[in-house]
Amino acid sequence: MDLRPVGFPTLFLELSKLANTLKIRYDQRGDMRDLEEAMYLLRQALEFVPVPHPDRPQYLFYLAEALYSHIQPKRYEDFKEEDDVIADEMAALCREALELPPPPKFPLNRLRLFDILRAGLHARILRSGGLASSELDELISIYRERVKFGPPSSFMKLHIELAVFLFLRYDKRGELRDNDECLPICRRALGILDEANPMLHPILHHLISLFARSLLVQFKKEGDPNDLEEGISFSRKMIQIGLPPHVDQTEFLTGLAALLFARYKLTCNTSDFEESLSLYKRALDPDLNSSFISAIMLNNYADVLLARFAKHGHRKDLDQSISLYKRASNKSHPSEPSHSVSLRKLNDALGLRSVLDLDLAT
């Protein structure tokens, strides 16, 4: 191949054949040098199939597959700068391949492209702690498209991940239609798990946590106490099964705490109030420094402390609630609904403390 000139008409075919041979050998032996050479050759081949070329989508796919093999074995927290660049390149290749007309000679594996693009966007989330609004929209669109063609065996994983990102977008924008779509996905998935053996499923506590938070949104929208009861019931069932010892329990515990506090405001049942407070203390201890702590969780915990201040008049509860509202406002983006909520509640609490200080001074 070294003897063939750059302008040789089928050079891109020869390059891709050699690259695929190297990729197969990498899959068999795990020698990263083979994969890196395959990536180099596929980038070269792609230059010979510019946008008008009908086979370009297939060569985009070959390169995206090779790039995915490069980052797939690594944990995202171990990514180096070059891995970030590769993940972004991989996502860009998939986007282009999906937008172009399918190649006439090859059956393009669109499902695999969706999965590689999904992996690239997941890498962005775990690397940077979040997605831009447009990327979140793109990811949800990918999932909606992907679940249409996935086999029945993939329902659980794909649909639950779709529900997670729908609720994340609800948190960011406050659009109830996202929660309305999230809730039935959670309910159906829990029904499937209930028919099997839920104790053996590693994502059960994540699913129940999401379901509980979605039910609380539904309750605030429609005011049906049955939503609270359903969420509390599923959460208690999870506690009976046993929470996994080596995973972050922040989302699960604060979800149950929020449901209990909402029920307390309906029924004035003191035990619900005390349990809610205990769960928030356990989940949001500042020493834990959990990456899962959100502005909404902090706001909700501050609300419970403020309610106890109103009940008993202990100044430390008011001071702690102010501190939590400040943390919440710093943790959320100004465009998110939770940011304005945090600032409004912080101003109210500061005003209350000013009145209290004035009363003490006179």
Image (cartoon, grey):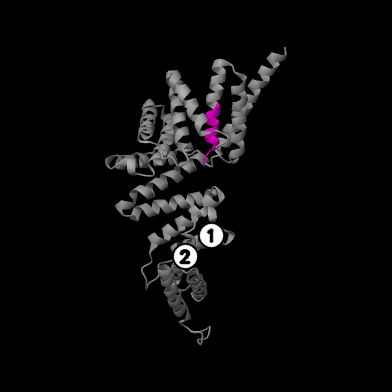
Q: What quarter of the picture does the C terminus occupy?
A: top right
Choose between 174 and 12: the one closer to the eye: 12
Q: Answer with the quarter of the image where residue 260 lies.
A: top left
Disc 1 is placed on an element classified as helix
Q: Position of residue 25 (x, y in %)?
A: 42, 72
Density class for disc 2 (Cα within 10 Å; few <14, some 14-19, many ≥20) is many
Q: Residue at x 33, y 49 (%)?
A: 155
Q: Position of residue 19 (x, y in %)?
A: 46, 74
The amino acid sitting under disc 2 is: Ala
Above or below, comparing residue 361 to residue 182 in the picture: above
Q: What segment carries the magenta color?
A: 292-302
Query: Which residue, given by chain and number where applicable, does mark 1 sit on?
Result: 88
Q: Which mark is residue 97?
A: none
Q: Residue furthest right?
A: 362
Residue 152 shows in the view: yes
Residue 293 within the segment the image draws in magenta: yes
The amino acid sitting under disc 1 is: Asp
> Left of 220 or right of it: where is 291?
right
Choose between 68 and 352: the one closer to the eye: 68
Query: Which residue, given by chain and number where applicable, does mark 2 sit on?
Result: 64
